[in-house]
Image (cartoon, rainbow, N blue to C red):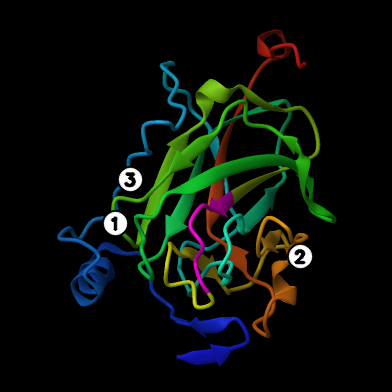
Protein backbone atom coordinates (compact mmCIF):
# COMPACT_ATOMS: atom_id res chain seq x y z
CA UNK A 1 0.00 0.00 0.00
CA UNK A 2 1.41 3.36 -1.01
CA UNK A 3 -0.04 6.62 0.26
CA UNK A 4 -0.17 9.41 -2.30
CA UNK A 5 -1.87 12.83 -2.59
CA UNK A 6 -4.93 11.50 -4.40
CA UNK A 7 -5.93 8.69 -2.03
CA UNK A 8 -4.93 5.15 -1.26
CA UNK A 9 -3.84 3.51 -4.48
CA UNK A 10 -3.24 -0.21 -4.51
CA UNK A 11 -0.09 -0.67 -6.55
CA UNK A 12 0.55 -4.12 -7.75
CA UNK A 13 2.09 -6.08 -10.59
CA UNK A 14 -0.21 -8.80 -11.82
CA UNK A 15 -0.11 -10.81 -15.01
CA UNK A 16 -3.51 -11.14 -16.57
CA UNK A 17 -2.87 -14.84 -17.03
CA UNK A 18 -5.56 -17.36 -16.31
CA UNK A 19 -3.92 -18.91 -13.27
CA UNK A 20 -3.33 -15.62 -11.44
CA UNK A 21 -6.81 -14.41 -12.33
CA UNK A 22 -8.33 -17.44 -10.60
CA UNK A 23 -6.42 -16.55 -7.45
CA UNK A 24 -7.43 -12.88 -7.56
CA UNK A 25 -11.07 -13.64 -8.20
CA UNK A 26 -11.13 -15.87 -5.15
CA UNK A 27 -9.24 -13.34 -3.03
CA UNK A 28 -11.24 -10.24 -3.97
CA UNK A 29 -14.57 -11.94 -4.75
CA UNK A 30 -14.53 -10.71 -8.33
CA UNK A 31 -16.89 -13.47 -9.39
CA UNK A 32 -17.12 -17.22 -9.65
CA UNK A 33 -15.27 -17.55 -12.93
CA UNK A 34 -11.52 -17.77 -13.43
CA UNK A 35 -11.70 -16.48 -16.98
CA UNK A 36 -11.41 -13.00 -18.39
CA UNK A 37 -14.49 -12.49 -20.53
CA UNK A 38 -15.75 -9.47 -22.36
CA UNK A 39 -18.63 -7.83 -20.52
CA UNK A 40 -21.83 -7.06 -22.38
CA UNK A 41 -22.47 -3.34 -22.92
CA UNK A 42 -25.67 -1.87 -21.53
CA UNK A 43 -28.68 -1.79 -23.89
CA UNK A 44 -28.12 1.80 -24.99
CA UNK A 45 -24.61 1.04 -26.28
CA UNK A 46 -24.57 1.24 -30.08
CA UNK A 47 -24.29 -2.26 -31.55
CA UNK A 48 -24.16 -2.38 -35.35
CA UNK A 49 -25.58 -5.32 -37.29
CA UNK A 50 -22.68 -5.52 -39.74
CA UNK A 51 -20.42 -8.24 -41.07
CA UNK A 52 -17.43 -8.97 -38.88
CA UNK A 53 -14.44 -6.91 -39.95
CA UNK A 54 -10.80 -7.57 -39.26
CA UNK A 55 -9.05 -4.68 -37.59
CA UNK A 56 -5.91 -3.55 -35.87
CA UNK A 57 -5.99 -2.88 -32.14
CA UNK A 58 -3.96 0.12 -30.99
CA UNK A 59 -2.71 0.02 -27.40
CA UNK A 60 0.11 1.44 -25.31
CA UNK A 61 -0.22 -0.54 -22.07
CA UNK A 62 1.67 -3.85 -21.71
CA UNK A 63 -1.34 -5.92 -20.67
CA UNK A 64 -0.30 -6.06 -17.01
CA UNK A 65 -2.17 -3.95 -14.47
CA UNK A 66 0.03 -2.12 -11.96
CA UNK A 67 -2.58 0.10 -10.30
CA UNK A 68 -6.13 1.37 -10.47
CA UNK A 69 -7.26 4.96 -10.92
CA UNK A 70 -10.37 7.09 -10.77
CA UNK A 71 -10.85 10.89 -10.77
CA UNK A 72 -10.85 10.75 -6.92
CA UNK A 73 -13.37 13.55 -6.41
CA UNK A 74 -16.91 13.76 -5.07
CA UNK A 75 -18.24 15.00 -8.42
CA UNK A 76 -19.40 13.44 -11.67
CA UNK A 77 -17.94 14.11 -15.11
CA UNK A 78 -14.34 13.15 -14.40
CA UNK A 79 -12.54 11.36 -17.23
CA UNK A 80 -9.40 9.33 -17.89
CA UNK A 81 -8.32 9.11 -21.51
CA UNK A 82 -5.74 7.82 -23.97
CA UNK A 83 -4.74 9.60 -27.19
CA UNK A 84 -4.22 7.25 -30.16
CA UNK A 85 -2.31 7.72 -33.42
CA UNK A 86 -3.52 5.42 -36.22
CA UNK A 87 -0.81 3.64 -38.23
CA UNK A 88 -2.83 4.27 -41.41
CA UNK A 89 -5.52 6.56 -42.86
CA UNK A 90 -8.40 6.71 -43.48
CA UNK A 91 -9.39 4.53 -40.54
CA UNK A 92 -12.74 3.62 -39.02
CA UNK A 93 -12.94 3.14 -35.27
CA UNK A 94 -14.89 -0.10 -34.78
CA UNK A 95 -14.54 -0.91 -31.08
CA UNK A 96 -12.94 0.18 -27.83
CA UNK A 97 -11.92 -1.71 -24.69
CA UNK A 98 -11.49 -0.60 -21.08
CA UNK A 99 -9.86 -2.65 -18.32
CA UNK A 100 -12.11 -2.25 -15.27
CA UNK A 101 -10.29 -3.16 -12.05
CA UNK A 102 -11.76 -4.78 -8.91
CA UNK A 103 -11.86 -1.80 -6.51
CA UNK A 104 -14.93 0.18 -5.53
CA UNK A 105 -18.07 -0.85 -7.44
CA UNK A 106 -16.79 -2.37 -10.73
CA UNK A 107 -20.27 -2.75 -12.24
CA UNK A 108 -20.97 1.00 -12.13
CA UNK A 109 -22.15 2.39 -15.46
CA UNK A 110 -19.78 4.74 -17.31
CA UNK A 111 -19.95 6.79 -20.48
CA UNK A 112 -17.81 6.12 -23.55
CA UNK A 113 -16.31 9.26 -25.07
CA UNK A 114 -14.43 9.67 -28.37
CA UNK A 115 -12.88 12.99 -29.36
CA UNK A 116 -10.45 14.42 -31.84
CA UNK A 117 -7.19 14.97 -30.03
CA UNK A 118 -3.46 15.56 -30.28
CA UNK A 119 -0.66 13.86 -28.37
CA UNK A 120 0.77 17.30 -27.61
CA UNK A 121 -2.47 18.98 -26.46
CA UNK A 122 -4.75 16.18 -25.28
CA UNK A 123 -8.48 15.63 -25.93
CA UNK A 124 -10.56 18.25 -27.74
CA UNK A 125 -14.04 17.96 -26.20
CA UNK A 126 -15.36 20.42 -28.76
CA UNK A 127 -14.89 17.72 -31.41
CA UNK A 128 -16.96 14.80 -30.20
CA UNK A 129 -16.88 11.93 -32.70
CA UNK A 130 -19.74 9.78 -31.40
CA UNK A 131 -23.09 10.37 -33.07
CA UNK A 132 -25.11 9.25 -30.03
CA UNK A 133 -24.54 8.69 -26.32
CA UNK A 134 -22.93 5.36 -25.45
CA UNK A 135 -22.77 3.88 -21.95
CA UNK A 136 -21.47 0.54 -20.72
CA UNK A 137 -20.56 -1.37 -17.56
CA UNK A 138 -18.59 -4.43 -16.52
CA UNK A 139 -20.40 -7.55 -15.37
CA UNK A 140 -17.80 -7.81 -12.61
CA UNK A 141 -14.35 -6.47 -11.82
CA UNK A 142 -10.92 -7.29 -13.20
CA UNK A 143 -11.83 -7.69 -16.84
CA UNK A 144 -11.86 -5.98 -20.21
CA UNK A 145 -15.13 -4.34 -21.22
CA UNK A 146 -15.56 -4.23 -25.00
CA UNK A 147 -17.94 -1.85 -26.77
CA UNK A 148 -18.79 -2.18 -30.47
CA UNK A 149 -18.79 1.24 -32.14
CA UNK A 150 -18.93 0.09 -35.77
CA UNK A 151 -22.43 1.53 -36.19
CA UNK A 152 -21.19 5.02 -35.29
CA UNK A 153 -19.19 5.44 -38.56
CA UNK A 154 -16.30 7.20 -36.83
CA UNK A 155 -13.79 8.11 -39.51
CA UNK A 156 -10.26 9.19 -38.65
CA UNK A 157 -8.99 10.83 -41.84
CA UNK A 158 -5.84 12.30 -40.29
CA UNK A 159 -4.23 13.13 -36.98
CA UNK A 160 -4.99 11.66 -33.56
CA UNK A 161 -8.12 10.72 -31.66
CA UNK A 162 -8.93 10.07 -28.03
CA UNK A 163 -10.98 7.44 -26.19
CA UNK A 164 -12.09 8.36 -22.68
CA UNK A 165 -14.00 6.83 -19.76
CA UNK A 166 -16.35 9.33 -18.11
CA UNK A 167 -17.55 8.73 -14.55
CA UNK A 168 -21.34 9.04 -14.28
CA UNK A 169 -21.24 8.32 -10.54
CA UNK A 170 -19.15 10.51 -8.25
CA UNK A 171 -16.27 8.25 -7.15
CA UNK A 172 -15.49 10.13 -3.93
CA UNK A 173 -12.12 11.23 -2.59
CA UNK A 174 -10.85 7.65 -2.41
CA UNK A 175 -12.64 6.48 -5.57
CA UNK A 176 -14.50 3.73 -3.74
CA UNK A 177 -18.03 4.79 -4.72
CA UNK A 178 -17.70 3.84 -8.39
CA UNK A 179 -15.52 1.84 -10.79
CA UNK A 180 -11.72 2.00 -11.14
CA UNK A 181 -9.80 1.69 -14.42
CA UNK A 182 -6.56 -0.26 -14.70
CA UNK A 183 -3.24 1.55 -15.16
CA UNK A 184 0.15 0.31 -16.38
CA UNK A 185 3.25 1.99 -14.87
CA UNK A 186 5.87 0.12 -16.92
CA UNK A 187 7.67 2.17 -19.59
CA UNK A 188 4.82 4.61 -20.36
CA UNK A 189 4.35 5.35 -24.05
CA UNK A 190 4.95 8.94 -25.15
CA UNK A 191 2.77 10.76 -22.62
CA UNK A 192 -0.53 9.67 -24.15
CA UNK A 193 -2.69 9.39 -21.02
CA UNK A 194 -4.76 12.33 -19.78
CA UNK A 195 -6.80 13.18 -16.70
CA UNK A 196 -9.81 15.41 -15.98
CA UNK A 197 -11.04 15.36 -12.38
CA UNK A 198 -14.57 16.71 -13.08
CA UNK A 199 -16.65 18.30 -15.82
CA UNK A 200 -15.64 21.79 -14.68
CA UNK A 201 -11.88 21.10 -14.71
CA UNK A 202 -9.31 21.22 -17.50
CA UNK A 203 -7.46 18.25 -18.95
CA UNK A 204 -4.01 17.50 -17.54
CA UNK A 205 -1.32 15.03 -18.46
CA UNK A 206 -1.56 12.13 -16.07
CA UNK A 207 2.07 12.47 -14.89
CA UNK A 208 1.13 15.82 -13.33
CA UNK A 209 -1.28 14.04 -10.97
CA UNK A 210 0.46 12.78 -7.84
CA UNK A 211 4.09 11.77 -7.62
CA UNK A 212 4.01 8.48 -9.54
CA UNK A 213 5.10 9.93 -12.89
CA UNK A 214 3.79 8.98 -16.30
CA UNK A 215 1.67 5.85 -16.78
CA UNK A 216 -0.60 4.26 -19.37
CA UNK A 217 -4.33 4.10 -18.75
CA UNK A 218 -5.61 0.72 -19.96
CA UNK A 219 -7.85 1.76 -22.83
CA UNK A 220 -7.53 0.23 -26.31
CA UNK A 221 -9.03 0.99 -29.72
CA UNK A 222 -9.55 -1.13 -32.83
CA UNK A 223 -9.50 0.47 -36.27
CA UNK A 224 -10.19 -0.80 -39.78
CA UNK A 225 -8.66 0.59 -42.95
CA UNK A 226 -11.13 1.54 -45.67
CA UNK A 227 -10.58 2.28 -49.32
CA UNK A 228 -11.40 5.81 -50.46
CA UNK A 229 -14.59 4.74 -52.29
CA UNK A 230 -15.92 3.28 -49.01
CA UNK A 231 -15.40 6.42 -46.98
CA UNK A 232 -18.69 8.24 -46.27
CA UNK A 233 -19.01 11.96 -46.76
CA UNK A 234 -18.23 13.94 -43.62
CA UNK A 235 -20.71 16.58 -42.40
Q: Which is more toward the observer, 59 or 102?
A: 102
Residues marked 3 and 1 touching at CB (< 8 Å)? yes
The tag on residue 28 is none
Q: Disc 1 marks which residue?
A: 140
Q: Is residue 41 above or below residue 15?
A: above
The Cα–Cα distance between marks 3 and 1, rounded to whole angstroms, is 8 Å
Q: Earlier in the sequence, mark 2 or mark 1?
A: 1
| Residue 217, image quadrant | bottom right
Q: Is residue 83 above or below residue 214?
A: above
Answer few, some or many: residues within 10 Å of disc 3's Cα (few below 14, many 20 plus, some between 14 and 19).
Answer: some
| 37 relative position to 167: left or right | left
Q: Residue furthest right?
A: 120
The magenta segment:
165-172
User: In which image quadrant can residue 103 be found?
Assistant: bottom left
Q: Is residue 133 magenta?
A: no
Front one among 5 and 233? 5
Query: How many residues crowd mark 2 within 10 Å: few (<14), some (14–19), many (20+)?
Result: some
Residue 169 in picture, x, y percent from top left: 48, 57
Assess whether mark 1 and mark 2 are in contact (beta carbons under 8 angstroms).
no
Image quarter in which the C terminus is found:
top right
Task: Please indicate whether residue 64 sits to the left or right of residue 85 in the image.
Answer: left
Q: What residue does disc 3 label?
A: 39
Q: Secondary structure at mark 3?
A: loop
Q: Earlier in the sequence, mark 3 or mark 1?
A: 3
Rounded to the nearest whole Å, what is the CA distance between mark 3 and mark 2?
A: 29 Å
Residue 33 place in picture, x, y as percent = 17, 58
**Residue at the image position 43 percent from the left and 78 percent from the top:** 13
Q: Residue at x 63, y 72 (%)?
A: 187
Q: For the N terminus, give its image quadrant.
A: bottom left
The residue tagged 2 is 204
Count up the numbered dots. 3
Amino acid sequence: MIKNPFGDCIIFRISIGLGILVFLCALFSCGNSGQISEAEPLPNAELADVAEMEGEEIFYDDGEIDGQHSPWVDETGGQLAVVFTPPFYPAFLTKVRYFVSFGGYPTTKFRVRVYKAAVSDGPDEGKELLTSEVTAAANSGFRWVEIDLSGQNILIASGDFCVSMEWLTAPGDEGKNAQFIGVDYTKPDNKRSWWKSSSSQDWKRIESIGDIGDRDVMIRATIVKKESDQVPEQP
